[in-house]
Amino acid sequence: MAHFFFLQFLLFITASSFTYISGQKIAPPPPPPSVTTTPPLPRPAQVFLDAHNKARAEVGVGLLTWSPMLAKETSLLVRYQRDKQNCNFANVTSGKYGGNQLWASGMVVTPRMVVDNWIAEKKFYNYAKNSCEGSDKCGVYTQVVWKKSRELGCAQATCSKEAATLTICFYNPPGNVIGEKPY
């Protein structure tokens, strides 16, 4: 029986040593951080996103976020256009996303150059009339700044045809809704 009390005493002392040191209680270890960090975007994706968001900020519209799903969709489409359609434009008007495209030849085209080209159409957009001036086009600009679009995904392909580059971006939800202003 004395042996049993000695073991109980020893267990009590051992258990107590885990929670007290010199009479001070030890704080439990902190929980792991709940903030999850996302890996940085690939450089071209970040440039596409930053260029779009700069144009959107200039007109007071919310920022886009990069969508890996949209980026995958544009990557599949741009490679299909390159490999099966002789690098011609895709039909992006019948899909469930908004879409912009740029085809350029004779030089390397960066993501920033693509978005700058689309934003250059701003000079043709008449906000009061919610239309493009004269016969000029401005739909790619209005898609870039469309206030209801929240997600972006883009991809580029280099084509052997005339050493060209084809770029496609998708927007979700789509913009350029007839009768609505972009911002």
Image (spheres, rainbow, N blue to C red):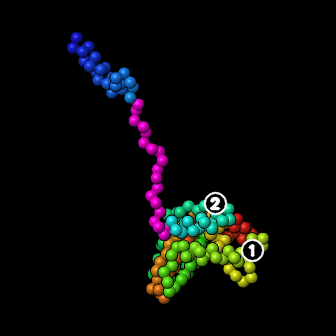
Residue 118 visible within the image: yes
Place of residue 140 in the rendered image (x, y in percent of width and height, measured from the top left) = 63, 74
Report which residue position mark 1 lands on.
126
Place of residue 151 in the rendered image (x, y in percent of width and height, measured from the top left) = 57, 63
Q: Quadrant of the N terminus?
A: top left
Instruction: List the single residue furthest toward the front.
Output: 22
Q: Quadrant of the C terminus?
A: bottom right
Q: Residues within 10 Å of mark 1 (few under 14, many from 20)?
A: few
Q: Residue at x 66, y 62 (%)?
A: 61
76 vs 40: above or below: below
Report which residue position mark 2 lands on.
62
Instruction: List the single residue furthest toward the right.
Output: 128
Judging depth in this view, the residue of 17 and 142 nearest the camera is 17
Q: Amino acid under label 1?
A: Asn
As measured in the structure, the alpha-carbon distance from the residue carrying label 2 to the one carrying label 1 is 21 Å
Residue interval drawn in magenta: 27-45
Q: Amino acid under label 2?
A: Gly
Q: Residue at x 35, y 24 (%)?
A: 20
Judging depth in this view, the residue of 5 and 13 nearest the camera is 13
Does dot 2 land on a helix, a strand or a loop? loop
Does dot 1 land on a helix, a strand or a loop? strand
Magenta segment includes 8? no
Say how many tags the image has: 2
- Judged left or right of residue 52, residue 157 is left
Q: Residue at x 53, y 63 (%)?
A: 66
Place of residue 149 in the rendered image (x, y in percent of width and height, measured from the top left) = 62, 64
